[in-house]
Structures are given as C-alpha cells and as structure tokens.
Amino acid sequence: MGTPGKSSGVLRTRTTVSPEAARHPSLRPPTKIADDPSFLGRLSTSGGAELSVEHIDDLATILAVLRAGSRRQRRAALARLRERLHDRKAIQTIAELRDVELGHELAQTRAELPGTPGRQARHEHGQWKRVAQQTEDAIRAFWDGQSSAEPIQSLPGDQRALLLMRISELPDVVVHHLTAIIEGNDGWVPLESRIGLISSLRYATDRRLVPALLSVVEAERGELVACAARVLGGIDDARVRPALAERFERSFVNEERIALASALGMHGDCRGLAEVRSSLEQDQPQLLLPALEAMENLGSSENTGLVAKFLDHAEVTTATQAARTAGRIGDGRVLDDLTERHKATSVPALRAAIEDALSSIAARMELRGEEAATIDWSEVGNKPVPHKGSRDSMPAIVIGWRDYFMGRVWLLLGRTTWAVARFESASARRMGWGVPLIGIGMAFARREQYALALPAFRRAIEVDRPRIERNPILVRAMAKSFLHRAEQVEREGRNDVARGLVGEVLRLDLRRAPGTVRFELKRKHDVLRREENDDVHSAA
C-alpha cells in the first residue's frame, strides 16, 4: 500500500506544477523582493490603478516623483506635469530638468513651453527633422546600391544620439534599416558597429525594435546580448520579460547575466539580485560598473551599505555611478556618507552626482512620509572660487577689456587669427581671467577646429571652471569639442588618446550640457573601456 501512497503524492504534485512551467523558467512568476508598502512603492504608472501617477493633483508630489521615482514613474510624472504648463513652477522645472533617460519626452514637452526654452526646443526639433530627412535619403541610397557608406555609422556621435532619441517619430524605412543592423542582416556593418548602434538605443522605447532585439538576446552572446537587454529593459511589451528570463536562466556569461538581471529588474523581476550583489561583494573590476547600474533597478535599503563603500573608489566613473545608485535606492542612512564624500572630493562630476543623489533621497523620504532630509546647500554646493583678476590694476583691467572687445570685432569680421591674438593679449594682461580664453575656445569650436579649441578650454577650466559649467552654451561647446576630438583620434587608431579625452571631460559637471552629448560621452567611455579590457586580456 506504500507505493500507491507515493504515487498519489506524485500525482498531487503534478497537478500543482505545470510541466511547461517547470521546463521554461521564463513562465514562472517574477521573483520579487519584499513589497514596499509606502506611497512611492505602491505608486503605479497605469491609469487603471487606484494609486496612480495620473491621479496625482498636488504639484509638489508630482515634482518629488520626478526626482525620486523609477524611470517609468518619472516618465508618467513628466506626462502629468505636461498637463500643467500654465503653472510657473511646472514650466521652470521642465526647463531645468536634465534627465537623460527622459530625453524624448523632455524634448516634446519643452517644445510647448513659452519663451526662450520653447524656442530653443523647437529649433532643436527642426535640427532633428533635417538630420532625419538626410538620414532617410542616405538609407534609401544605401539599399539601392547608390552608396557604400552606412548612414547611421557615418553620423557624428552627438547627431546619432539626437536622431535616435526621437526614434518613435522616425519612418518605418529608417527603423527597418536599424533593425537590419541590429540583427546583422545588412551584410555590411561589423560587430563593433552593431554593438555601438544597440548601445546608442539605450533609452529607446519604440516597440518596433522588440523583434530584432529579442533575436539578438536569443541567438547571440556577450556584449551584444548585454546591450540588447539594456534597451529591452525600458520597453513596455509583453514579449520582453519572458525572453529576458529565459535567456538569464541559460546564460553562463557574467556580463550577460548582470545586464539581463538589470533589465528584468526594470520589469519587476528580481531573480538576478543575488548575483548582482555577489559581483559587488567580490569587487570584480570588469563587472563593477554594470553591477552598480543594475542595483539602480534591483537595489533596496538592504543594499545601501554595499553601494556606499564604492563612493571612495579611485575610478571617478565608478564613484559617480555609486552616488547615482545610492540616490535611486533612496535610503536616508547614506546621507552622511554622501555629504562627507562631497566635502572631501575635488572632482566636479562626482560632486554633481552627489548633489543629484541628495535631492533624490530627500524627495523619496518625503514621498514615503518620513521626515524629509534637510540639506545645507551652502555647504554642499560648489565652493566659491576666488576671482584672481580682482587684484589687477585699473590700467590692466581697462586695456584687457579693450583687447577682448577688439578680438570680438575681429571675429565678426572673420579674421580668426587676429582675434585670437587679441584674446591672448587680454588674457596675458590679467592673469586668471577666463573670459578671453573662453572666447578662443568658442571661436575654434564654431569652426569645428576641435584640436585648437581644447587647449583654450583647458586653460579656461583651470582658471574659471564654474563659469563654463554653469553656462549651457559654454558647456555645450566645450563638451562637444572633447567628444568630436575623441572621435577624430579614435578614427586614426589612437584609442588611448580618445579614452583620455573622454575621461577628462567626464570629470566635469556636465549637467547643463545637452542630454545627447552627455549620453554619447558616457557611451563612448564604456566602449573604449571595454576595448581596453579586451586588449589587456588578449595580451595576457
């Protein structure tokens, strides 16, 4: 009688677990962490939910969600804010928001603003339309055999980022070309370019990309899978999570698994949390940045201490990512660590990341009903830089300004050499005066002579860095000069020089630079870093 009993037990087990679900891990329910019962934890982005961003009327709450929520929550909060463009506070927030992950939505919303921000956004949209039309014409010529140059890879990095930021507005012919490259069906683009294109789509949300990206996740290996997974994490489509889960369960490449775990976390599935945490505990150099990025989507207050220890990391990019991740986790216990690190560091990029993290944590604490953190921005903000030119004699000041204005006149007349000579004279008369140096850098940047612009910008940064970082026009020109010069030397095969240029500019506070430029600099840094690691392993 014992056997039938065992048999009946087996039968009962088989009736509670579907054989198909046991065979395919992607069909199992998502692995979740402990539910967050707070307002922010229960806040949905779906209008059908009882507690949804779409039902929030309080402007202060919307702004807090925009600072502290997940990417989907922030996107929904921006859409809600778009309905309140009659409110001055809403207009100011939209004009000042620098969230690169919401680049497309921000561009659309800013185009509806009154005044200068709206005009600038509409001008940028006009630029995008021209680039999109030129690219569409070039793609048709490419597939008709009239051109051998692949149009997307021929674009400068910031223009490619600008084009792909609004991919949902591109016609099918362009998207079909992109998917052909993603799948490797174009017969022309090498593997490195495929990886570059997919990484450029990092924040795309167009569902037309899903089949091509899923084919990469299912059939490829290594960096291709990791890049495709990062894109799929931000796309709302029912096909995505099962495919990511299935690939995660059968993948054995660490880089793939970390990226897949991060993407699954964006879809509410935290099955990869233990592996991401283990990578951080073991401090594996190659996996450190991807694991910290994954913790943005997977981390909870239990992981705060683990993330905080990387705030003191020697690599600026790693410390900056740790600050960003700590801000996304939003645990108030890390406020002291962030503040102390902010006081100790002299790296502008890290200081900027910490300031953003402090604002995000304060907003999250407010939304959770906790006592909001009180941040002394007089201590946290940038330390004032003494103006060295204040001790100059009156004749030196007068003659310096005269030389500077004469340089401006020569620029208007198109005599760049004479203008630069005047700017140099003005700078020499007043040591520590950055304005003439900025004039030289801007003159060469407008003429796309980036190799000549860099020395002037470097000198200006040395004597008056805050003036450049706080001016959107100046920081745009400076960042683009570094980016385009890095692209030039990379095409010449000098990857070490390109890596140094990108790393140098990423140490600065680029929050006021265009999101497309910041995104491309970060992407370029990741690509060059990966190539460096590959070279090291090949040599070993």
Image: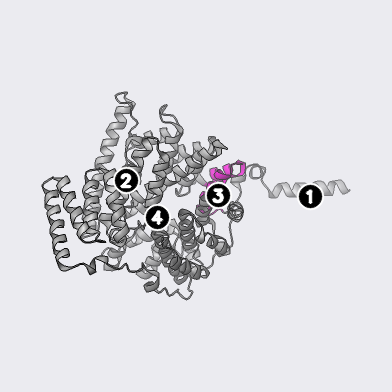
Q: Quadrant location of residue 52?
A: bottom left
Quickly name the residue at label 1. Answer: 9
CA–CA distance between discs 3 and 2? 31 Å
Give the residues in magenta: 241-269
Most frequent secondary structure within the magenta stretch: helix
Quickly name the residue at label 4. Answer: 507
Residue 180: x %, y % from top left: 41, 32
Of residues 416 and 366, the one drawn nearer to the viewer in this rendering = 416
Which callout, 4 or 2, points at the residue further toward the start of the chain?
2
Number of numbered labels in the structure image = 4
Asked if residue 21 shows in the view, the reply is yes
Quickly name the residue at label 2. Answer: 162
- Assign a secondary structure to mark 4: loop
Which callout, 3 or 1, points at the residue further toward the start of the chain?
1
CA–CA distance between discs 4 and 2? 23 Å
Residue 66: x %, y % from top left: 39, 62
CA–CA distance between discs 3 and 4? 20 Å
Q: Residue at x 27, y 66 (%)?
A: 388
- Assign a secondary structure to mark 3: helix
- Residue 285 is labelled as 3
CA–CA distance between discs 1 and 4? 63 Å
Asked if residue 107 shows in the view, the reply is no
Of labels 4 and 2, the one closer to you:
4
- Residue 446 is labelled as none
- Dot 4: within a 10 Å radius of its alpha carbon, few (fewer than 14), some, or many (20 or more) residues? some
